[in-house]
Image: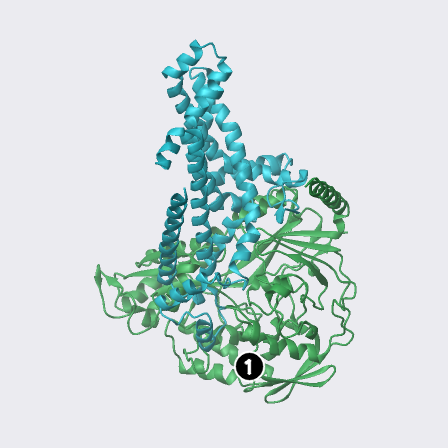
């Protein structure tokens, strides 16, 4: 087990080093961040002074090693734009993204798996065809467009829900969350549903194809022959056997939702991390870009680790292999 | 654990009640949906337009600007030069800071001296670079000594925000963002702010100016255009700025919305590179040629004549603009009223190209910004089609600002278009930077990347920057405008207009040429 952890952490470090090199070289290739940030009325002397102050006059390799040296001491630097510690800036946005991503995943899972099971259990029913039609829409229609439609329908025309932004926040376990009040919930419904649509379609199709396959297998026939109720057959035998790919997809999607919910956050003006990273890219705020991507790498490694542990719980064969 | 939940529940209920109550007295609260906000609450951190616009609610400037960017008294009631290199500012008496202390000349001196220590990448030192030292003469008199004669110093001080001396020399962004150091003399007191989030202020009852109609002002930052318009239509905000041209057209028919239009300081200008050789040679009949055709005034004139500015405004900008014949509004200090409207004449353009030796035209790359200003990439593409009619093959390439500005700085473009706003309302800001020969020693021509150099223009600009007499200086700058525009050092195309929108019948927004959205100028309709 410990070997497994160490292997994962080494992997993460390798990815972080590779990624930081790519970001540094990439930003360097685009050009000097000062030229994007500087005021048009500045003169040449001021430009030179700023370049020196931010260390852009040093060679790329030098800049890189200074950054990495600071990082090893736990200092990821300050944002060029806000002059605030990068980590604080990112963590101030994390709760908003966290609650949005988790709400979206909950909607996708709690709707997607039952619907997929039903569609796989009764593949020829009209209701199943309808569900499958919906799932196609779910991942073929662009997110931003659905988002705008949702706003037009529920916020502008009907006036039931707010058109964007985040509700009032309260401190819960040191995190500023908005989902504990009805008002806060009213703000999160539309963006969470918008973000969930793609995953919903994916989960429905994944669950259905697994169910169709498993339903015709021997152990389902034996379970039925044993006299088990249909509910038990589907809920216990089928669900457990199709859950490995579902958990894999769930993990991957959770990671990408946390890291890249940019489109939904933009359309609904949700103050999450996705908007922060996009804003940072447009002004070449390199410290924020690097720190954010390091965080994303860690998130993915962490989620994959949890997914691997769950595999073991779901399928004893995997556990045996890992132990040997 | 249970205790925490109970507390959380009570808090939530209190908040819910609070928001219900606040919506009941919403006549007193103004909620704005704005495209951009500040980067910090420290007014000296950045020269960003949206930074100044936001912090004006909390901090006052020494000199203020009216809706046409002409100077009016702010925290200084008057100013005059006492000798060639000294300006005397009389500070307004009876002004209170939000913490109750009095404003004195010491606070102003502290603010000027503080700027070089705290500024970031958009450095405020551009407004204090002429200052050599500041001297407090008495409680309400300040002398500012400049390195050389500096007639434009009061213009620069339109952006000079005054902070309280009591915050100390060490106050950084953290202290300002938390509100501890955010002590100004402005009409509103700072309440809270989150980067890219909401900026909230409350009326300051001890304000020296007019009493404010709004008890509370919330500026919600909503950068996405359609999200901002949806927020207005759904009633989440009372008003929005930067209405896109397409939404403006549909709002004309909407009975629930009022719109407000203003000319802006932003102009879209074409810059021809007139250096000996171009970074990428132009092509004639598909072959590279060594010469730079843009050096020939006839070629520049031909390109100018081929631009149909009226069509640009009417079709491309949906009417939200004006044809331009110089780089700033004519009403600004140094703007020329003598320059004629630019003609549109393709036949003459073709003839001029033939005379210059390019009867079959040439092929050239044309770079522009994309989404930096409304309509910039659309204007760019329309221009390349207009030039095609005169026989030129222009490859338009709209680039993101992240790519455009570094490449422009490195001199990689042959022909480009970008926006420029004369934010000080005065000619030397624009012409000194764009058409004066690039001279790092004097700091002139910092954005003259096209290699334009005209000794006559340089002489006029240099003389103007030393002339303390206003009418004389105005005449010199008018001449600069005329000479450089007739040379086509830059080719102006259109002046952009800005649109605000608000809930029907709720308020009036006085148009401002600098596009600023200021709660203290917005009045409820009665």
Looking at the image, residue B24 sits to the left or right of residue B292; the answer is right
Residue at x-position 37% and y-position 63% = A28
Please say whether residue B367 is visible from this viewpoint: yes
B399 or A276: nearer the viewer: A276
Tell me if residue A143 comes above or below residue B447 in the rendering.
Answer: above
User: How far across and down, in percent of the image, does residue B276 sit?
Assistant: 29, 74
A212 or B378: nearer the viewer: A212
For residue B256, what is the image quadrant? top right
Chain letter of mark 1 equals B
Colour of chain A, in one word, is cyan
Residue farthest along the bottom direction in this orientation = B83
User: How far across and down, in percent of the image, does residue B458 sit?
Assistant: 44, 81
Residue at x-position 54% and y-position 56% = A89
Tell me if residue B222 comes above or below residue A47 in the rendering.
Answer: above
User: How far across and down, in percent of the image, does residue B113 sit?
Assistant: 61, 79
B235 or B432: nearer the viewer: B235
Looking at the image, residue B350 sits to the left or right of residue A123; the answer is left
According to the picture, the residue beneath numbered tag 1 turns out to be B130
A293 or B39: nearer the viewer: A293
Residue farthest along the front direction in this orientation = A324
Chain appearing in green on the rendered image: B
Q: How is the image coloured?
A: by chain
Residue at x-position 47% and y-position 21% = A236
Looking at the image, residue B157 sits to the left or right of residue B102; the answer is left
For residue B148, what is the image quadrant? bottom right
Looking at the rendering, in which quadrant would you find the N terminus of chain B?
A: top right
User: How far across and down, in percent of the image, does residue B92 sit?
Assistant: 74, 76
Please say whether residue B248 is visible from this viewpoint: no
| Mark 1 crowdedness (10 Å alpha carbons): few <14, some 14-19, many ≥20 | many
Tell me if residue B301 comes above or below residue A166 in the rendering.
Answer: below
């Amino acid at each position: 087990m410990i070997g497994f952890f160490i292997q994962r952490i080494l992997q993460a470090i390798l990815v972080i080093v590779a990624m930081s090199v790519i970001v540094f070289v990439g930003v360097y290739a685009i050009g000097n961040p000062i030229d994007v940030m500087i005021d048009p009325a500045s003169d040449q002397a001021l430009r030179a002074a700023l370049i020196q102050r931010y260390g852009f006059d040093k060679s790329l390799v030098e800049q890189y090693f200074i950054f990495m040296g600071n990082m090893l001491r736990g200092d990821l630097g300050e944002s060029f734009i806000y002059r605030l510690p990068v980590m604080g800036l990112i963590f101030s946005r994390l709760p908003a993204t966290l609650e949005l991503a988790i709400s979206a995943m909950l909607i996708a899972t709690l709707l997607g798996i039952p619907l997929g099971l039903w569609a796989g259990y009764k593949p020829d029913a009209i209701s199943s065809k309808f569900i499958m039609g919906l799932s196609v829409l779910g991942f073929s229609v662009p997110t931003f467009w659905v988002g705008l439609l949702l706003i037009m329908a529920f916020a502008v025309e009907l006036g039931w829900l707010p058109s964007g932004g985040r509700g009032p926040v309260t401190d819960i376990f040191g995190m500023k969350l908005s989902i504990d009040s009805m008002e806060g919930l009213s703000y999160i419904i539309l963006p969470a549903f918008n973000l969930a649509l793609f995953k919903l379609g994916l989960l429905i199709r994944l669950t259905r194809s697994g169910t169709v396959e498993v339903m015709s297998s021997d152990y389902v026939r034996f379970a039925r022959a044993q006299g088990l109720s249909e509910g038990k057959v589907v809920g216990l035998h089928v669900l457990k056997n199709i859950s490995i790919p579902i958990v894999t997809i769930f993990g991957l999607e959770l990671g990408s939702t946390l890291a890249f919910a940019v489109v939904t956050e933009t359309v609904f003006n949700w103050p999450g991390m996705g908007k922060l990273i996009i804003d940072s890219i447009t002004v070449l705020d390199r410290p924020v870009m690097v720190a954010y991507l390091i965080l994303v790498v860690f998130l993915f490694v962490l989620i994959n680790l949890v997914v691997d542990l769950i595999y073991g719980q779901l399928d004893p064969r995997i556990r045996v292999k890992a132990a040997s | 654990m249970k205790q925490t939940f109970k507390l959380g529940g009570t808090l939530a209920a209190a908040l819910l009640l609070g928001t219900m109550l606040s919506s009941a007295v919403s006549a007193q609260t103004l909620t704005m949906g704005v495209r951009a906000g500040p980067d910090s609450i420290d007014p000296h951190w950045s020269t960003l337009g949206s930074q100044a616009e936001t912090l004006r609610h909390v901090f006052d400037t020494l000199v203020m600007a009216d809706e046409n960017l002409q100077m009016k008294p702010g925290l200084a009631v008057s100013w005059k030069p006492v000798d060639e290199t000294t300006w005397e500012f009389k500070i307004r008496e009876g002004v209170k800071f939000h913490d109750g202390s009095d404003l004195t000349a010491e606070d102003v001196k502290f603010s000027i001296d503080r700027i070089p220590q705290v500024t970031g990448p958009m450095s405020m030192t551009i407004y204090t670079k002429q200052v050599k030292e500041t001297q407090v003469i008495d409680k309400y008199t300040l002398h500012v000594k400049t390195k050389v004669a500096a007639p434009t110093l009061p213009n620069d001080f339109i952006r000079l925000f005054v902070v309280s001396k009591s915050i100390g020399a060490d106050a950084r962004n953290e202290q300002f963002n938390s509100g501890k150091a955010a002590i100004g003399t402005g009409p509103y007191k700072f309440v809270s702010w989150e980067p890219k989030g909401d900026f909230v202020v409350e009326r300051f009852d001890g304000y020296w100016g007019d009493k404010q109609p709004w008890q509370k002002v919330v500026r919600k930052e909503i950068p996405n255009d359609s999200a901002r318009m949806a927020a207005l239509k759904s009633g989440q905000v009372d008003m929005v700025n930067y209405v896109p041209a397409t939404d403006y057209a549909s709002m004309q028919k909407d009975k629930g919305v009022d719109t407000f239009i203003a000319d802006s300081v932003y102009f879209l200008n074409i810059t021809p590179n007139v250096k000996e050789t171009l970074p990428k040679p132009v092509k004639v009949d598909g072959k590279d040629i060594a010469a730079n055709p843009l050096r020939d005034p006839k070629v520049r004139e031909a390109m100018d004549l081929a631009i149909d500015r009226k069509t640009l405004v009417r079709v491309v900008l949906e009417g939200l603009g004006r044809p331009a014949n110089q780089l700033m509004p004519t009403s600004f200090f140094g703007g020329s009223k003598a320059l004629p409207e630019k003609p549109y004449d393709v036949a003459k353009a073709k003839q001029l190209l033939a005379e210059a030796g390019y009867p079959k035209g040439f092929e050239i790359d044309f770079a522009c910004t994309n989404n930096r200003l409304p309509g910039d990439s659309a204007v760019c593409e329309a221009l390349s089609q207009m030039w095609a009619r005169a026989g030129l093959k222009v490859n338009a390439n709209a680039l993101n600002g992240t790519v455009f500005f570094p490449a422009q700085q490195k001199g990689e473009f042959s022909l480009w278009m970008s926006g420029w706003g004369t934010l000080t309302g005065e000619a030397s800001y624009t012409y000194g930077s764009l058409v004066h020969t690039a001279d790092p020693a004097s700091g002139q021509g910092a954005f003259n990347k096209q290699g334009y150099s005209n000794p006559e223009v340089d002489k006029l600009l240099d003389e103007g920057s030393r002339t303390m007499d206003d009418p004389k200086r105005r005449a010199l700058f008018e001449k600069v405008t005329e000479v450089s525009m007739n040379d086509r050092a830059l080719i102006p195309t259109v002046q952009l207009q800005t649109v605000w929108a608000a809930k029907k019948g709720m308020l009036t927004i006085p148009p401002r040429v600098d596009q600023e959205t200021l709660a203290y100028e917005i009045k409820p309709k009665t």
